[in-house]
Image: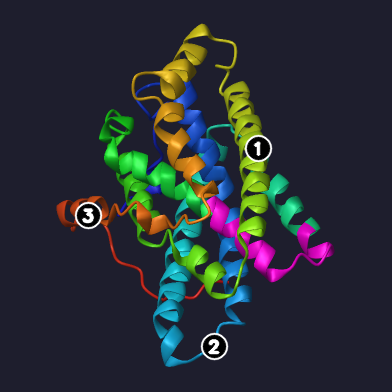
Amino acid sequence: MVDLSQGFPRHWLAGGAFRTQFFNAMSMSFPVGEQDFIDSVREAALALPDDAEHASLHATIRDFVGQEATHRRVHTLYNTELEKQGLVNHWQHWAAKLIALGRERNMPAISRLAVTAAFEHYTAVLADLTLRNPEIMGDADPMLRTLWTWHAVEETEHKAVAFDLYLTLGGSYKTRVRWYMFAMTRFTIMATRQTVNNLWHDRTLFKPSTWLDAASFFFGSHGLFWLSFMPLLGYLKRDFHPWQHDNRALAEQWLRANADRYSIVRGLKAA
C-alpha cells in the first residue's frame, strides 16, 4: 500500500508545521495504544459466551484485532521515519506507564474496555472528519494521504466493536462516561505535550507561522474544533451508540475508489 522506507517530507501536510506535527503525534501514540486496545478487548472477550448468539460479535472482534495489529505495524514504521527526522516519541512511554499503573492497581477488565471504547470513539470521530472533509488531507503528501485515509476507513469499520462488547458484558452508563472523561483528559494532555515537543525538535515551535497554522487547523472555517465538538459530546448521551452516525457509505466509497491501493485484513493474530 505505502512504502514508508522511502521517507516522506518533514512538513508533509499542506506544508504546515503544526498540522503535520499534530498528526505525527497521533502516530506516535498508536503502537502502544492499539496494542492495549487489542489486549483489553481480548481480556474482556474471555467473558463472552462462545455460542451462536454471540458468534457475530466474536467475528467482529477477530477483525478488530487484525486491523489494529496492522495499524500498529504500519505506524511503527512511520514512527521510525519520524525518529530519523529528529523527533522524539515521549507519548509511547507516557502511555506505557499509564497502562502499567492500571495493571498494578488491578483495573477491572470492564473498565479497561470502557477506556478502549472511549479512545475508539475519538479515533472514529477523527476518521469521519477525514473521510467527510477531504480538504483536511487534500494537500498532503500522496503516500501519507493514502495511509491516513486508509486508517480512517478501518477505524470506521470497527468503531462499534469495543462499545458493543462493553454493552453485551453489562457495562454501565456511569462507568462508560467516567472513563470517557478520563480518557479524553489524558488524550488532550498527551497530544498537546507531544505536538509541542515535536515542534521543538522541528525548530518551528516559536515561529508565528506555526501558530497561525494551529489557529487555522483548529478554529478555521473547517477547523477541527468546530467539526469534532458535537460528535465528541454525543458520547455522553445515555442512549448513544456509534452506529447512530452511520458513515459506512463514506468508507465503502473510498475502498471502491482505491481498490488497488490497499489490502483487506481479516482475523490476523497479534502479539
Q: Earlier in the sequence, mark 1 or mark 2?
A: 2
Q: Residue at x 64, y 47 (%)?
A: 183
Query: Disc 3 marks which amino acid?
Result: Ala
Residue that protrudes farthest toward the right in the picture: 105
**Residue at 67% across, 51% down:** 178
Q: What kind of colouring is applied to the model shown? A: rainbow
**Residue at the spot of label 2:** 49
- Judge by depth and name the residue closer to the eye, 111 or 15: 111
Front residue of this view, candidates 18 and 187: 187
Mark 2–mark 3 distance (CA, rounded to whole Å)? 31 Å
Kindly identify which numbered label has been placed on residue 190: 1
Regarding residue 151, the answer to whether it shows in the image is yes
Residue extent of the magenta highlight: 102-119
Q: Position of residue 36 (x, y in %)?
A: 62, 61
Q: Locate residue 255 relative to residue 171 in the image: left or right.
A: left
Residue 114 x %, y % = 61, 60
Residue 105: in magenta span: yes
Q: CA distance from mark 1 to mark 2?
A: 36 Å
Q: Main secondary structure of the magenta part?
A: helix
Q: Residue 58, relative to residue 252: is it above or below?
A: below
Provide the secondary structure element on which disc 1 rests.
helix
Query: Residue 169, position in %: x, y?
Result: 58, 75
Q: Which residue is mark 3?
A: 249
- In the image, what residue occupies the spot 43% across and 41% down? 231
Q: Amino acid at mark 1?
A: Met
Q: Quadrant of residue 223?
A: top left
